Image (cartoon, coloured by chain):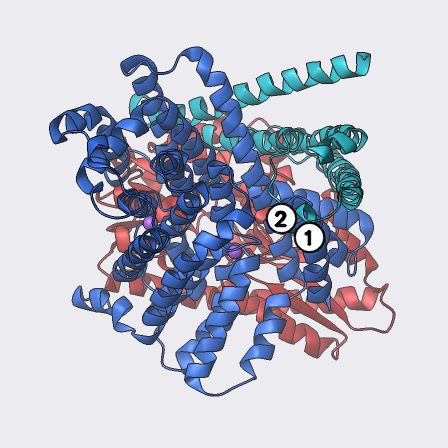
Chain colours: A red, B blue, C cyan
């Protein structure tokens, strides 16, 4: 390290609040890092987006004022084009398939693909699967989404996906979404169970359809300027703490998902399992329209892993 | 140490009359250079400056500034005020009361104190001036009343608090905000009327008040604007931010086609005036977002509050310390970063004293609302001063009694949890 | 004289540019609301356009507002000073504005443009280079530098008023 004998404290910023499983797991990572490195390394965590949105934090890592962050792979799309792969709907057969891919060489090469953009992926966190929730209309099949305004994330791939399935993708900023749902500007949105629960959107939504259209992992990113300044030993410590945090986070995330689903059911939301096959059929045109050769190859490799 | 440099540089630059926004940026830059290399520091500040502005919700500011100007010059404001004079013109401080109520109403519907200030202040401050109230007083009334919309739902800041506190129901918070919001509104009305009486500001002569029916019928198309905005938001046709654009469109049609009080040629200077005011406010918002960023980065809030909280173990004293810290914080920091940073620090302390997160949230938002209109960093105060064309130092004197009114409301809300908790309990939300 | 004429032309260009951008800002979001009702699929790009327009209007507008001397400050102390000292502080402020414009806006802004350009970051919906959006920062810096230079030169007239 360029800091000589001094202990290294890495500034890591993220957008979620301190109750969120991601924050808890980063605290765990900090504990483990301190133990493994015998107090020579630690994390300083800045939660709640107080240092900026995901896009802005990645930029700050490139600028060099921040060391690490947790971002959604979808936020990385604007920086690392290969990350678009995760925005493809119904790419994975199930949770097992998803994690098989993440822990395979494919997952590793996706993490490394950020290096040329100064952001190295260190490891994955589970961010579950995103599903539709609606305020008043019960949705069970793609055709039920017709004419419904569904709020999507601020990304072209998310817009294309919802429009292809049959809804009308509508841009609403995350901060305005609660009131937009409550007052009917949009009739639905989509997110994973813990976000559905923590954002309180279940207070104004009656139906939650577990169609699990996308599984977009969270990525722990380290700036190459920081990574390159670490000694080989320090890199090993950080990587080990990351791997232990991933195992821990997957467990916490699972518990959080179950708890969130139980809580929203308790609050009166009807939670339904979707017939995924008909949803899968509705998005074939999206796969046909892929032009990038590297994405096509990745899709083929991932599909092949699912057949085993 | 960083905090001393930050505030020291800031204070000196303010005194030599450098624009506030630049004083904030310089203070941030000097403090940042202590821990960060020069080029990354400069680049980070450039990024925070744009990131602070890069928010869809902030669009409400230019829209409502523009619609405020259109209403003022296009004859809409004139008709609305003639009508309100019919209703309350005979009371002492009549127009001040109208101003408070309009700001509170608009602030609660739009959820944005800045939007309320620009929309209502844009025509109420000149109208009040015409009736003998001085501009600084009109500005002071507008900015303080506009913040009551933070408590009365819908309110984005209450949603942010809910997320930061990790568990308080938004529905409960929304219901809880009504009584405290009304309490502040009433206190402000009382303070404004007292101010008017003590300073012997003349109320309207009876001759200047039109008869009821002509005033009412003249105001109908203008009154429809209010229904359009409120109805559109509640009816789910557009979001509060989008309502701004619709308000512009409607006032444009009304004043251009219906009242014919402005022509297409007049639009050019009106647009430029809007850009001018918008840019002043946005530069300040960008600058304070850079400063808030640095404060978080250097962990200044944590350092200060941990120091303060070790001072005492007496519950009442701790509550007092929390409130005073927030009041001081509110003078330097904008509301959203303050809520995000201080909720996780103070809420556990408050809960250990037996204060419910709901009560704490309302107390905190009310407290920080005061900060929105205190210098040196108060976005609502800035907008008010640019709209009202008055300097900050002129506003200080007439705004003091209004601060006092808000402060008394804060003390009541802090001491009597029932003010926040009665309604949510009655509705079975807690 | 030629310089004065050039500056006047620039001012006029800025005014027209800013007014057009402001009008576009209204059209854009009105269109966003309308498409939710008249089109089967609401427009998805209007939100991003609006945010980027706001950044441009604000940063170029900030220089324009500086030109009009309308930024907020605390004039309490300076008003009480004798003319010679007031002139000194006025010039000092001009100098500080130049330092701010060159360091933060031009150097910091150019680095931001350079980074986002060389690392190929594009906006999430419109897919335009973020470097293009950020280029307004150094541009605004040039305007601030120019205007503070003019104010510095005309300082004695300004204080006399
Ligand atoms: Na409100
Ligand atoms: Na303040």
The residue shown at (70%, 60%) is: B6
The reply to whether the residue tagged 1 has its Cβ within 8 angstroms of ligand 2 is no
Quadrant of the image containing the N terminus of chain B: bottom right
The residue shown at (58%, 49%) is: A54
Q: Is residue A128 left or right of residue B34?
A: left
Can residue A153 be seen here? no
The residue shown at (28%, 40%) is: A187
Which residue carries the number 2 mark?
C74
Chain name for mark 1: B
Q: Looking at this view, is B281 or A216 the one in front?
A: B281
Q: Residues within 10 Å of mark 2 (few under 14, many from 20)?
A: many
Is disc 2 in the same subunit as disc 1?
A: no
Tell me the number on the disc at residue B226.
none
Q: Looking at this view, is B388 or C25 the one in front?
A: B388
Q: Which SS class for mark 2?
A: loop
Quadrant of the image containing the C terminus of chain B: bottom left
Q: Is residue A275 left or right of residue B4?
A: left
Q: Quadrant of residue C138?
A: top right
Chain name for mark 2: C
CA gap between label 2 and label 1 equals 7 Å
Which residue carries the number 1 mark?
B15
Asked if the residues shown at circle 2 and circle 1 are in contact, with their CB atoms under 8 angstroms apart, the answer is: yes
Q: Looking at this view, is C36 or C63 the one in front?
A: C63
């Amino acid at each position: 390290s360029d800091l000589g004998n001094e202990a290294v404290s890495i500034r890591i910023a993220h957008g979620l609040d301190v109750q969120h499983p991601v924050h808890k797991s980063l605290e765990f990572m900090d504990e483990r890092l301190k133990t493994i490195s015998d107090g020579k390394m630690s994390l300083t965590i800045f939660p709640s987006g107080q240092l900026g949105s995901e896009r802005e934090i990645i930029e700050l890592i490139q600028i060099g004022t921040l060391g690490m962050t947790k971002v959604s792979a979808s936020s990385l799309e604007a920086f690392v084009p290969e990350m678009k792969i995760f925005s493809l709907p119904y790419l994975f057969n199930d949770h097992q398939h998803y994690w098989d891919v993440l822990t395979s060489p494919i997952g590793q090469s996706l993490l490394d693909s950020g290096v040329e953009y100064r952001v190295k992926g260190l490891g994955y966190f589970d961010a579950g699967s995103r599903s539709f929730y609606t305020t008043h209309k019960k949705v069970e099949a793609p055709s039920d989404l017709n004419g419904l305004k569904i709020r999507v994330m601020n990304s072209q791939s998310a817009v294309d996906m919802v429009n292809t399935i049959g809804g009308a993708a509508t841009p609403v900023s995350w901060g305005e979404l609660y009131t937009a749902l409550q007052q009917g500007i949009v009739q639905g949105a989509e997110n994973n169970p813990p976000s559905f629960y923590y954002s309180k959107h279940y207070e104004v939504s009656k139906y939650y359809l577990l169609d699990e259209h996308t599984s977009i992992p969270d990525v722990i990113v380290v700036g190459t300027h920081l990574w390159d300044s670490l000694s080989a030993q320090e890199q090993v410590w950080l990587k080990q703490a990351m791997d232990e945090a991933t195992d821990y986070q997957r467990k916490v995330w699972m518990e959080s998902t179950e708890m969130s689903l139980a809580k929203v059911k308790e609050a009166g939301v009807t939670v339904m399992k979707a017939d995924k096959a008909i949803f899968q059929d509705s998005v074939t045109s999206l796969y046909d329209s892929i032009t990038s050769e590297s994405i096509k190859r990745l899709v083929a490799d991932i599909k092949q892993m699912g057949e085993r | 140490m960083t905090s001393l440099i930050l505030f020291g540089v800031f204070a000196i630059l303010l005194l030599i009359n450098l624009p506030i926004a630049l004083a904030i940026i310089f203070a941030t830059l000097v403090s940042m250079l202590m821990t960060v290399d020069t080029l990354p520091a400069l680049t980070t500040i450039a990024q925070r400056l744009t990131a602070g502005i890069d928010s869809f919700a902030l669009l409400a500011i230019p829209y409502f500034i523009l619609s405020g100007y259109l209403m003022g010059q296009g004859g809409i404001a004139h008709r609305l005020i003639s009508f309100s004079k019919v209703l309350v013109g005979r009371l002492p401080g009549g127009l001040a009361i109208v101003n408070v109520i309009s700001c509170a109403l608009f602030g609660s519907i739009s959820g944005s104190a800045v939007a309320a200030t620009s929309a209502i202040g844009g025509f109420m401050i000149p109208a009040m001036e015409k009736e003998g109230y001085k501009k600084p007083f009109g500005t002071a009334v507008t900015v303080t009343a506009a913040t009551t919309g933070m408590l009365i739902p819908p309110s984005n800041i209450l949603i942010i608090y809910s997320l930061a506190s990790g568990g308080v129901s938004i529905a409960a918070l929304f219901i809880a905000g009504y009584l405290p919001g009304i309490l502040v509104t009433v206190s402000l009305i009382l303070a404004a009327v007292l101010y008017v009486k003590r300073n012997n500001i003349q109320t309207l002569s009876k001759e200047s008040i039109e008869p009821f029916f002509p005033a009412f019928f003249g105001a109908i198309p203008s009154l429809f604007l209010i229904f359009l905005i409120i109805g559109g938001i509640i009816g789910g046709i557009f979001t509060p931010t989008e309502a701004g654009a619709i308000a512009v469109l409607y006032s444009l049609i009304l004043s251009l086609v219906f009242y014919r009080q402005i022509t297409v040629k007049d639009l050019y200077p009106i647009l430029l005036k809007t850009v001018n005011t918008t840019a002043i406010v946005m530069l300040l918002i960008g600058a304070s977002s850079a400063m808030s960023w640095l404060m978080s980065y250097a962990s200044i809030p944590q350092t200060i509050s941990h120091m303060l909280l070790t001072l005492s173990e007496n519950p009442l004293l701790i509550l007092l310390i929390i409130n005073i810290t927030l009041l001081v914080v509110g003078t330097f920091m904008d509301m959203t970063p303050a809520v995000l940073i201080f909720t996780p620090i103070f809420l556990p302390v408050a809960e250990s004293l037996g204060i419910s997160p709901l009560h704490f949230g309302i107390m905190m938002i009310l407290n920080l609302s005061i900060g929105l209109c205190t210098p040196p960093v108060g976005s609502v105060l800035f907008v008010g001063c640019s709209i009202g064309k008055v300097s900050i130092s002129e506003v200080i004197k007439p705004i003091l009694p209004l601060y006092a009114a808000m402060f008394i409301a804060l003390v009541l809300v802090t001491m009597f949890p029932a003010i926040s908790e009665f309604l949510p309990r009655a509705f079975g939300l807690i | 004289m030629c310089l004065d004429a050039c500056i006047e032309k620039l001012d006029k260009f800025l005014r027209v540019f800013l007014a057009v951008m402001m009008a576009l800002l209204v059209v854009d979001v009105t269109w966003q609301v309308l498409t939710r009702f008249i089109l089967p699929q609401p427009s998805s790009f209007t939100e991003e356009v609006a945010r980027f327009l706001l950044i441009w209007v604000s940063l170029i507008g900030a220089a324009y507002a500086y030109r009009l001397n309308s930024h907020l400050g605390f004039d309490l102390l300076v008003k009480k000073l004798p003319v010679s000292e007031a002139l000194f502080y006025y010039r000092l402020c001009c100098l500080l504005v130049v330092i701010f414009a060159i360091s933060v806006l031009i150097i910091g802004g150019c680095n931001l443009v350079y980074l986002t350009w060389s690392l190929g970051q594009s906006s999430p919906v419109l897919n335009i280079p973020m470097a293009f959006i950020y280029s307004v920062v150094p541009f605004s810096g040039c305007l601030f530098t120019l205007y503070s230079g003019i104010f510095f030169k005309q300082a004695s007239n300004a204080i006399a008023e």
